[in-house]
Image (cartoon, grey):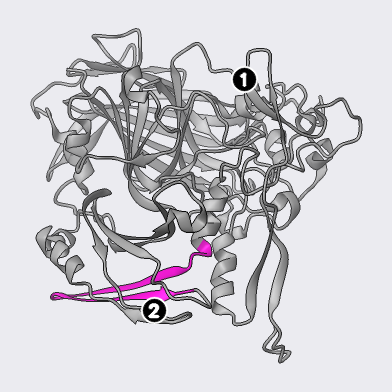
Amino acid sequence: TAPKLNEQRPFIMCEYAHAMGNSSGSLSDYWDVIKKAHGLQGGFIWDWIDQGILMKDENGREWHAYGGDFGEASHDANFNINGMISPNRRPHPAMIEFKKCAQPVDFEFSWLGDGQLELRIVNRRYFTTLDDITVVWALRVNGFVVETKALAFPTVLPQKSAEVDGASILQALAHHNIQQLISDGDSEIHLDFSASILGATLGATSERVEVASDQITLSTQGKKKSKLPYPKHLILCQNNDKGRLVKAEPDSMSLTANGFTISLVDGSFIYQSVTDSTKPIVSSLQPNLFRAGTDNDGVKQLGDQFFDKSKPLGLWLTLGLDCTTLEDLDVTLSSKKINFSGDAMDFPSVVTKASIFGNPRRRKYEGISLAEKLEDSSTSSVKLGKWEQQVTMVGNGSVYVEITLDLKESLRDLPRVGLQFTSPCMGKACFFANGPHENYSDRRYSAHAGVYEVDTPSSLDTYVVPQEQGNRTGLRWLFLYQSSSSDNAGRSKEATEVEEDSIANLVANKTGILILPEDLVEFTTSRFTDAEVFAARHVNDLIPPNNDEYYVRLDVAQRGLGTGSCGPQTLEKYTIHGGTYRIAFWLKPVGYD
């Protein structure tokens, strides 16, 4: 509106984002406008730091106190826990997102083929050059870094750009046959840029500090009808003797092949090795439509927010999304054609059809004021939609799972649409997805596609108040594998780049389960259920379970974060409504021979 009013003065937004808990969605949407609109200088984010008071419980576990923890009758609960960094000064993922939005360097890249490319470096600074900055590029093939080098560039004046000699990048593209890989259509190619300055410049202890990053997509996952669509699937063909029998048992509704068996139980299934039947590889697969509400979904310790129509959390509890069940089960034997390298074969499968019901008040949340507002009369089950699951086993024991969720069109603004299953706590998770840090549909601008690994978390302490956390978008594959305690000693809880250069090398000599979605999905892994996280007021309320269950959540979509605890809710384009959703994936056991 400023140009229409002939307004020439600079415009600064006051509190355009509220960083309470897992928040700050749509920062990149704001910054798209800020960078395009002359005179729009940015604004203020509320606020800098979570104002919690460090405490220790009787077992020495640390937690942070906030409103209501000192017996006071009048308080605003955790409304002082609304910073971009934690009380111990650890940046929240939202700070990483903001850093990307406001970075001082951008890159413009165009690959013209035939040995030509155009590369420009853009100086977003207003007063100084980029002479203090070092730039490094990295070439990724299917998520793995195959080559990296420093990039020389000329002096770039403030608010200007300069052309950069990309000869070293062209040489790498040629050396790794990137043009051929793109023509074949079955590889993902990315080019990353990282700009850093000397740590001493910022008073940091590290030698260099990254101040800007970017990722250029040269090709995305392709699909060909003549063969399996992507190199990640090649591992599925290992040990796949086409003549190997898959045995189907109608009485028990089970499938067996190559020393693995899958049994259907109450709409779910148990997938295990016959040599170790005491520890299923995968079990308890079920629909998952709930998340442990963020503060933007509704501040769970403020009961009045149950009635606030702008906060969806009360509606989710009213629908019983926190406790869904499958009813009216119909289980039958069937078959499915699976295409291995152009040769389609029929394999036996089990099809389960059921109705999805939500069960409000089935779970009790003592001390969670918002949940306690749900009336006792709201106890009848709510039909949410239909569930169809087809589980197919192939000759090498791998399993293909295909699920359709047909949710009522009247359901609006859902937290997620997906599934959850349990797997033994393997110790490590390695994934090809957007990362390395957590990201969501409206807060993923800073997340780059790559292969990263992280230790299995035994606690959830990203946020002072336990809530939804740890999501990653764009999952291509996930590998959960066993590691010794010495492997984990002294390691950071943050995800890091892997050292291997291919998925074959990564899984070699390891024991675990490889999860291969057919299409890009979102995923979360945790030692706790969403209901357990929602029930907790502080991080020390979440006691690591004595069992070795590890929860894996795969989502067709999850609701964005928005900034609705004190500001706009999630934008419509990041919300989820009723409809028909499909999710399909492979389960491949590794190292069980």
Q: Is residue 48 visible?
A: yes
Image: 272 above or below 182: above
Residue type at numbered disc 1: Arg
Count of all numbered marks drawn on residues in the image: 2
Q: Which residue is mark 1?
A: 61
Q: Residue at x 12, y 43 (%)?
A: 341
Query: Which quadrant of the rendered structure holds the C terminus?
Result: top left
Residue type at numbered disc 2: Val
Q: Residue at x 37, y 24 (%)?
A: 488
What distance separates the C-alpha of mark 2 from that of mark 1? 50 Å
User: Which of 138 and 182 lies nearest the eye of the viewer?
Assistant: 138
Q: Is residue 177 left or right of residue 448?
A: left
The circle drawn on residue 156 is 2
**What predominant SS class does the magenta segment belong to?**
strand
Res. 277 image quadrant: top left
Q: Is residue 151 left or right of residue 179?
A: right
Query: Which quadrant of the rendered structure holds the N terminus?
Result: bottom right
Q: Position of residue 116 (x, y in %)?
A: 18, 77
Mark 2 or 1: in front is: 2
The circle drawn on residue 314 is none
Image: 458 above or below 502: above
For mark 1, does the 10 Å Cα neighbourhood hold few (<14), some (14 to 19), or many (20 or more) residues? few
* Range drawn in magenta: 101-124
User: Which of 155 and 363 lies nearest the eye of the viewer?
Assistant: 155
Furthest residue in direction right, as rendered: 73
SS at badge 2: loop
